[in-house]
Amino acid sequence: MINKKMEQLGKVRSVIRELFEYGKKRKAEIGEDNVFDFSLGNPSVPAPDCVNETIRALTEEMSSLQLHGYSSAQGDAGVRKAIADYLNKEHGESFTADSIYMTVGAAASLTICLNALVCEGDEVVAFAPFFPEYRVFSESAGAKFVALAPTEDFQVDEAAFAKAINQNTKAVIVNSPNNPSGVVLTEESIKALCRVLKNKSEEYGHPIYLITDEPYRELVYDDVKVPFITKYYDNCLVCYSFSKSLSIPGERIGYIAVSPKMDCERDVYAAICGAGRALGYVCAPCMFQFVAARCLGQTADVSVYKHNRDLLYNALCDYGYKCIKPDGAFYLFLKTPEDDASAFCENAKKKELLVVPSDSFGCPGYVRISYCVSTKQIENALPAFKALAEEYGLK
Ligand code: PLP
């Protein structure tokens, strides 16, 4: 007998992966340029030059044994110090090397935090729309996953949020800029969220942890600012990844930053080291720890995503679709003109448009369009979006 839950997870591909596989098959049938695949969040802009330059420099400066060997389980001390110093400079914080734990990307940052915190009977809350893996990660850490219904603008409704918190709530996950909506939480929303968490922690006599999932922190457009949450709440764990900011998702590198103001901060950090150990993360990839440390503050060319966003958003609004203008990440969340998002996706598929129905994001009635694709793909896909809008009589 094997673990049936794991067997099920392995057998049932996510809707996103399912679509991506369909897209590959369809491209083989009718040609690469005739399928408009907006399913995956795989960066389409190359890594900035500093990534390859640093790799070259490291291979000359360091011995192969140093560069490709194990680091300390929590990550190289110099790398962790560089990250702490960078965060302090950027956000006026007081992290030290011992606040930072290097991980294999945001997914691992999240699973490690959840396994470090969750005890039997605990609940983990997330705001819809949410990254579908939150449910998988929370449940496999042993928590009950609680999805909070979305508000109209995808910001925080303080009263509804307060109602979702109870004696068993251990942690709340927030993701801003958000996958799938592209929405950035306002400072007002963050203050409301933190007010509830402080009051409820006091009421129930134990900390409720705030886990912020931040792989898209630097992917913001115009003058939008992403508030740094440790300033507003002490019991906060920042889950960061270089996957999107440096366009290196395959290299698997990120970190957890534990707020230095957290209650029993040393114990929480120890639990993070323990969870990393129990999950079998020996250490994060050593060479990419060094690369990340030397490329702090650099990003891939975000202006390409902004151009794609503007092109797509303006055209879709013009065709009569309804969507919130995304301020960050590289996703656009479009309200489907019929209630059944999957039915809309099937119709879109007939025009070779591959978009993701929103049900698994906990927010029915939308589709996610990943615009981390070539601008040419968007230009070529626009007539199909227009024809689809006309079929639904949008204008
Ligand atoms: N969190 C969110 C919201 C994401 O969109 C993703 C990836 O798309 C992840 C976490 C996982 O990121 P990583 O590649 O760093 O593990």
Image (cartoon, grey):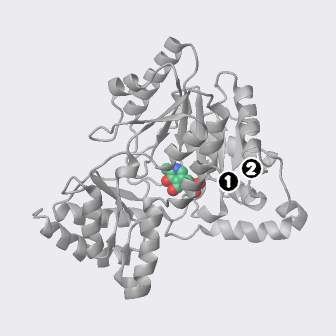
Disc 1 Cβ-to-ligand 1 distance below 8 Å:
yes
> Considering only vertical position in the picture, is 141 above or below 377?
above
Residue 159 shows up from this direction:
yes
Side of 320 where 344 appears, left or right: right
Query: Where is residue 193 shown, x and y percent of the image?
Result: 43, 28
Query: Where is residue 53 shown, x and y percent of the image?
Result: 70, 70
Picture quadrant of residue 34 = bottom left
Residue type pointed to by label 2: Tyr
Side of 35 where 42 appears, left or right: right
Labels 2 and 1: the sequence-earlier one? 1
Q: CA distance from mark 2 to mark 1?
A: 8 Å
Residue found at x 28% / y 67%: 346
Residue type pointed to by label 1: Val
Q: Nearer the viewer, residue 46 or 285?
A: 285
- The residue wearing badge 2 is 281
- The residue wearing badge 1 is 104
Residue found at x 19% / y 56%: 338
Camera-near label (2 vs 1) is: 2
| Label 1 element class | loop
Query: Where is residue 301 shown, x and y percent of the image?
Result: 50, 65
Residues at marks 2 and 1 touching, judged by CB atoms closer than 8 Å: yes
Residue 81 shows up from this direction:
no
> Considering only vertical position in the picture, is 107 above or below 87?
below
